Image (tube, rainbow, N blue to C red):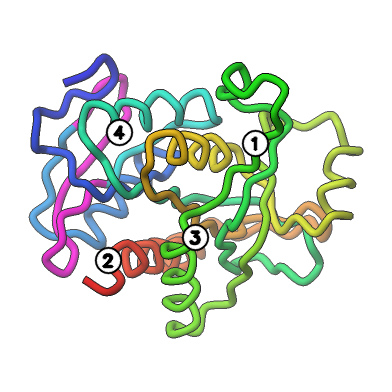
């Protein structure tokens, strides 16, 4: 049990999927896992552990933004020995070749700043995904026929962005999409020697201004969850 996670020792699996929304964690656990147990309710940040194809999995909310995710990932790694951490969430498309409903698998995560900036000081550390997870997720997406893009994303500090010039530069440099958590997840995984990946569904688009209708979200997000699960246990 930690300050923010009420799970007892052994209740958190070594593989953890991290949606930002705790209610999306509940939906994903009830939809894709068997023998589901709620292992955390502290501050309303829900976490669930169950099995997928015989493998133990925890699906735990991380909150919005890198500071919130940093709290949960630090505790999941240092107190519960999580080994594989995969962010599953939504993002905004930033290239005309990327469509709403597509999946983005984040190879790298650019940021203006992260909670780790104080550690790196003058170094512009380049956080990236675990290659084996990345490759397995790309293979799983191809096998499913899911429209997928693999490349760099932008982890923003803000949702209501008042710096359009930053977005323009991200688009200019080929960034596929924008979200708010992956860069710090990749930083923490590198620091602690763990595997990390972000698998994201494009829910809206910064260029076309298209947005995914609410009624379509569950099926599209379901593709993302299954890709993440297949990647986590590829070869096992």
Q: Residue at image x 49%, y 58%?
A: 199
Residue 234 is left or right of residue 167, and the answer is left
Secondary structure under badge 3?
A: helix
Question: Which residue matches tag 1?
Answer: 125
Question: Which residue matches tag 2?
Answer: 233
Q: Are marks 1 and 3 in contact (CB under 8 Å)?
A: no
Question: Which residue matches tag 4?
Answer: 77
Say which of marks 3 and 2 sits in front.
2
- Counting residues from the N terminus, which is met first, the one under dot 1 or under dot 4? 4
C-alpha span from label 3 to label 4: 30 Å
**Residue 43 has which mark?**
none
Secondary structure under badge 4?
A: helix
Bounds of the magenta segment: 40-58
Q: In the rendered image, which quarter contains the C terminus?
A: bottom left
Residue in the foreground of this view, choosing between 182 and 42: 182
Where is residue 81 shown, x and y percent of the image? Answer: 22, 36
- Counting residues from the N terminus, which is met first, the one under dot 1 or under dot 3? 1
Placement of 124 over or under 6, stated as above or below: below
Q: Residue at image x 8%, y 37%?
A: 10
**Residue 217 has which mark?**
3
Where is residue 157 shown, x and y percent of the image? Answer: 66, 29
C-alpha span from label 2 to label 4: 19 Å
Residue 55 is left or right of residue 228, and the answer is left
Query: How crowded is the residue under tag 2: few (<14 C-alpha within 10 Å), some, or many (20+)?
Result: some
């Amino acid at each position: 049990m930690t300050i923010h996670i009420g799970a007892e020792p052994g209740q958190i699996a070594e593989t953890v999927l991290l949606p930002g929304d705790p209610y999306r964690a509940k939906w994903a656990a009830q939809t894709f896992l068997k023998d589901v147990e709620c292992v955390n309710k502290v501050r309303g940040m829900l976490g669930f552990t169950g099995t997928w194809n015989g493998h133990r999995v925890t699906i735990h909310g991380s909150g919005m933004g890198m500071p919130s995710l940093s709290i949960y990932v630090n505790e999941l790694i240092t107190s519960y020995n999580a080994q594989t951490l995969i962010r599953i969430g939504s993002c905004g498309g930033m290239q005309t070749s990327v469509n709403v409903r597509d999946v983005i698998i984040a190879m790298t995560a650019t940021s203006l700043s992260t909670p780790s900036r104080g550690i790196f000081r003058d170094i512009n550390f380049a956080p990236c995904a675990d290659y084996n997870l990345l490759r397995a997720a790309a293979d799983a997406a191809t096998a499913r026929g899911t429209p997928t893009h693999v490349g760099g994303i932008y982890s923003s500090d803000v949702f209501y962005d008042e710096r359009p010039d930053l977005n323009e530069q991200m688009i200019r440099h080929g960034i596929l999409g924008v979200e708010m958590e992956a860069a710090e997840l990749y930083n923490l995984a590198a620091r602690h020697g763990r595997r990390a990946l972000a698998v994201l569904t494009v829910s809206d688009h910064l260029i076309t201004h298209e947005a995914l209708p609410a009624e379509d979200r569950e099926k599209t997000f379901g593709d993302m969850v299954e890709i993440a699960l297949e990647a986590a246990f590829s070869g096992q």
